[in-house]
Image (cartoon, rainbow, N blue to C red):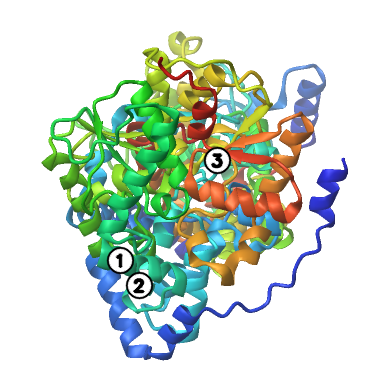
């Protein structure tokens, strides 16, 4: 137990952060270089004003017709993404770890809030899973990897909830929780989870095209 | 409503396997090696980060489905935009080009006949992934493999031989213009269609089908130009056709030749700007795709679509109308000039200036449903007509709804839309009349003297 | 032991939240009950983040761990921050060194203060447990519900 614990909180944690940061920089840079080499026109049409206009419309809940036509998905995605980011950063246990290891600290969420937010993340994952299984047009697009990614994202929240509430086997579950979080971090640069970094660019580009060339809205 | 019932009750014609001679003959000549090398060439040399990002970023969420009239009409998951990527480039990139001729056949059918490249889905994808672009890459691969539907390939051949879409010979073109000039002189004495006039304010260009089947549109344009006392001209030589099926087959080399000739025709005559007839795809080729292929960020000479031009005529009070068009109208927003150029408000200005009774169809403006004919789909010809009309079911519902509110006339300021809507109206028994803005303006125009 | 439980129960009933006591981390020992050491609540306020009370059984721990000298935990450092071997700091509360002027900071930023001391406490226990490969390391092993 102790050696597992020291490994997952020591070397593996460092590996996870390094893979996440360096992997993301590498992937981003390779796409950037490829764009410069092969799609340099993209830079010609990128327009800050129209890019931001488009991004803003798509970051406001129900800001696009697409979101209005899919209200359940809109609510689920927004809550999911907000909780997905806020919870791990501001849950008290994690703030404590930052304090212990790097002597930095910030606002921490009340326990109850962290629980509710964890439920939201898990609930949204179940909703996404339901869509993938039940909606024919989503099912058709779904690959095994999509389920794995959903698992990768849901796992840290399920195990974290388990460990916090000290359900049976919580000691091992805490270790699994740490590992699952590290897996998620490491998966970001190499899977579709990388969409978090690409969103401003894909959205910004189509926004620039629609705004600057097509003179139409894209939401 | 009995009308909308017709739409719902309309039996789904069994989607028989469509055989297209162009595609069939094309795949018969394919070998796996050839497929792989062509795919590698296109993907490595002609595409880059955009394609990669579009294919890799798609989260398979299915939200694009509601953006596609194919999916909305057919309710088949295979027709959602992302599904079309799944069946084409997604698989190709996963297998690194190692796909069978049979796969290419299916991919060609999808890319050429099941996507109108209307870009509506880009407005429904949270990431703004451009499926139309991915489909254009697929078409490019198919074109390079020689797997192109017969009918559209024929128009591309015409482009390369005659530099127009409809095999119009050089003398036939001039003959048609003179014939229309004569006809129009009955309406307006001293009317001219000035050919090759240098330094004109307006270089008026049309698409190949206008002299071929819809010559009255040239006649109407001539009347409107004359009534507005424009200093205008049309070219007597090739370069008059602004249409571009090569853009849709994936023959970009030919597209570049066509666009260059068109731009040069106008520039050689030192025209101030190009005004185009009511065509959507031609506008896309001149304003968006062709100029980029030639290395122009924006067109080298100002390009004005008829809607913008007509709007200007009314704003500057260059023409007068006798009375407003009485019958209730609705307006179809064509993709290439609305999502492609934001002319929807100008179109409404013209409607308000010319028509007494305007009924919006919903959704409208950027969100209007496609006519199912654009992107070269109608040009793939009779083998695909039934499938195309089937995919216009949602459009038919939208038209019925506008009709229920009283609309009798559909204004569709695009040739492709006209073709597509005509088939939809006929097939579903919508019984609405189709008109161009030119038709309406000509009908109510107050002729000078 | 019973006395301790009773006292805790009483406190709970009397409206002082249990957690207020539980995560009081100045380590100034106020109750030297039979087994559990607890710490006084003067330096911090309870907040919604407090975790369950940690029962640290001082004597049992030391016996089990075979600890002879006090300075393994009750450490002392000199001015240069160097550990002074063999010198114990049992007579001081942790906050005297680790949280500066506790009393006056309390009302200003209590959450921060908690965190500083709690972090020190956590590290003191866990680092040793990891080195020795003995004893609890994950949160719930000490903060038992």
Labels 2, 3: front one: 2
At 38% from the left and 90% from the top, the residue drawn is B29
Name the residue beneath numbered marker 2. B143
Tell me if mark 1 has few (under 14), some (14-19) or many (20+) residues whose alpha carbon lies within 10 angstroms of its own: many
B374 or A124, which lies in front? B374
From the viewer's perspective, is residue B113 above or below residue A156? below
Q: Horizontal and vertical percent for residue B198? A: 13, 34
Name the residue beneath numbered marker 3. A81
Helix, strand or loop for disc 1:
loop
Name the residue beneath numbered marker 1. B251
The residues bearing labels 2 and 1 have C-alpha atoms spaced at a distance of 6 Å
The chain under label 2 reads: B
Q: Horizontal and vertical percent for residue A139? A: 66, 63
From the viewer's perspective, is residue B175 above or below residue C119? below
The chain under label 1 reads: B
Residue found at the far right of this picture: B2
At 31% from the left and 21% from the top, the residue drawn is B229
Q: Is residue B308 visible?
A: no
The residues bearing labels 3 and 1 have C-alpha atoms spaced at a distance of 43 Å
C99 or A181, which lies in front? A181
Helix, strand or loop for disc 2:
helix
Tell me if mark 3 has few (under 14), some (14-19) or many (20+) residues whose alpha carbon lies within 10 angstroms of its own: some
Q: Is residue C57 visible?
A: yes
Q: Earlier in the sequence, mark 2 or mark 1?
A: 2
Labels 3, 1: front one: 1
Tell me if mark 2 has few (under 14), some (14-19) or many (20+) residues whose alpha carbon lies within 10 angstroms of its own: many
């Amino acid at each position: 137990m102790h050696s597992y614990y020291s490994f997952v909180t020591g070397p593996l944690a460092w590996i996870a952060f390094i893979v996440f940061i360096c992997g993301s920089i590498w992937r981003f840079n390779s796409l950037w270089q490829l764009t410069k080499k092969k799609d340099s026109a993209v830079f010609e049409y990128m327009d800050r004003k129209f890019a931001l206009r488009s991004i803003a419309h798509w970051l406001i809940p129900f800001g696009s017709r697409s979101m209005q036509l899919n209200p359940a998905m809109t609510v689920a995605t927004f809550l999911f993404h907000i909780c997905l980011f806020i919870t791990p950063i501001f849950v008290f246990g994690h703030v404590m770890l930052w304090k212990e290891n790097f002597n930095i600290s910030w606002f921490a969420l009340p326990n109850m809030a962290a629980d509710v937010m964890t439920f939201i993340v898990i609930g949204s994952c179940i909703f996404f899973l339901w869509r993938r299984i039940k909606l024919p047009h989503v099912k058709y697009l779904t690959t095994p990897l999509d389920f794995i990614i959903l698992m990768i994202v849901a796992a840290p929240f399920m195990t974290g909830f388990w460990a916090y509430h000290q359900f049976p086997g919580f000691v091992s579950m805490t270790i699994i929780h740490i590992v699952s979080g590290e897996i998620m971090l490491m998966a970001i640069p190499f899977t579709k989870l990388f969409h978090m970094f690409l969103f401003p660019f894909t959205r910004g580009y189509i926004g620039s095209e629609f705004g600057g060339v097509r003179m139409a809205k894209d939401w | 409503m009995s009308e909308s019932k017709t739409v719902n009750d309309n039996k789904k014609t069994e989607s028989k396997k469509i055989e297209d001679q162009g595609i069939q003959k094309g795949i018969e000549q394919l070998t796996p090696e050839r497929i792989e090398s062509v795919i590698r060439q296109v993907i490595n040399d002609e595409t880059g980060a955009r394609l990669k990002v579009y294919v890799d970023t798609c989260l398979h969420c299915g939200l694009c489905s509601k953006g596609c009239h194919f999916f909305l009409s057919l309710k088949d998951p295979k027709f959602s935009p992302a599904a079309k990527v799944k069946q084409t480039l997604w698989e190709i990139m996963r297998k690194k080009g190692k796909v069978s001729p049979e796969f290419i056949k299916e991919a060609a059918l999808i890319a050429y006949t099941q996507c109108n490249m209307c870009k509506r889905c880009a407005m429904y994808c949270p990431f703004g992934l451009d499926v139309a672009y991915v489909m254009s890459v697929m078409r490019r691969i198919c074109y390079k493999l020689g797997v192109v539907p017969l009918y559209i390939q024929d128009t591309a051949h015409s482009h390369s031989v005659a530099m127009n879409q409809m095999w119009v010979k050089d003398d036939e073109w001039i003959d048609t213009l003179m014939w229309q000039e004569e006809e129009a002189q009955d309406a307006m004495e001293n009317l001219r269609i000035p050919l090759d006039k240098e330094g004109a304010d307006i270089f008026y260009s049309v698409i190949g089908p206008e002299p071929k089947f819809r010559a009255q549109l040239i006649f109407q344009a001539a009347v409107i130009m004359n009534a507005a006392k424009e200093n205008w001209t049309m070219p007597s030589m090739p370069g008059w056709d602004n249409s571009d099926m090569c853009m849709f087959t994936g023959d970009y080399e030919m597209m570049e030749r066509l666009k260059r000739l068109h731009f040069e025709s106008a520039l050689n005559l030192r025209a101030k700007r190009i005004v185009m007839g009511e065509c959507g795809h031609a506008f896309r080729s001149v304003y968006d795709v062709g100029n980029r292929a030639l290395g122009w960020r924006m067109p080298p000479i100002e390009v004005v679509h008829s809607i913008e031009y007509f709007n200007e005529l009314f704003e500057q009070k260059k023409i007068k109308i006798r009375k407003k068009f009485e019958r209730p109208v609705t307006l179809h927003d064509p993709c290439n000039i609305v999502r492609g150029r934001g002319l929807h408000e100008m179109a409404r200005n013209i409607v308000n200036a010319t028509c007494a009774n305007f009924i919006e169809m919903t959704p409208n403006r950027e969100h209007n449903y496609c006519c199912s004919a654009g992107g070269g789909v109608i040009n793939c010809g009779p083998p695909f007509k039934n499938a195309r009309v089937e995919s216009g079911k949602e459009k038919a519902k939208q038209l019925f709804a506008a009709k229920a509110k009283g609309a009798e006339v559909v204004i569709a300021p695009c040739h492709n839309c006209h073709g597509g809507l005509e088939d939809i109206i006929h097939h579903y028994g919508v019984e609405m009349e189709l008109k161009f803005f030119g038709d309406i303006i000509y009908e109510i125009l107050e002729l000078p003297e | 032991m019973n006395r301790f439980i009773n006292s805790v129960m009483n406190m709970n009933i009397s409206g002082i939240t249990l957690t207020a006591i539980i995560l009081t981390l100045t380590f100034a020992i106020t109750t030297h009950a039979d087994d559990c050491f607890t710490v006084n609540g003067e330096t911090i306020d309870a907040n919604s983040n407090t975790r369950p009370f940690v029962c640290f059984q001082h004597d049992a721990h030391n016996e089990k761990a075979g600890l002879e000298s006090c300075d393994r935990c009750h450490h002392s450092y000199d001015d240069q921050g160097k550990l002074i071997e063999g010198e114990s700091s049992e007579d001081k509360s942790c906050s005297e060194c680790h949280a500066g002027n506790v009393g006056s900071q309390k009302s200003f930023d209590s959450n921060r203060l908690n965190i500083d001391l709690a972090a020190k406490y956590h590290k003191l226990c866990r680092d040793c447990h990891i080195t020795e490969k003995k004893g609890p390391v994950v949160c719930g092993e000490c903060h038992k519900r």
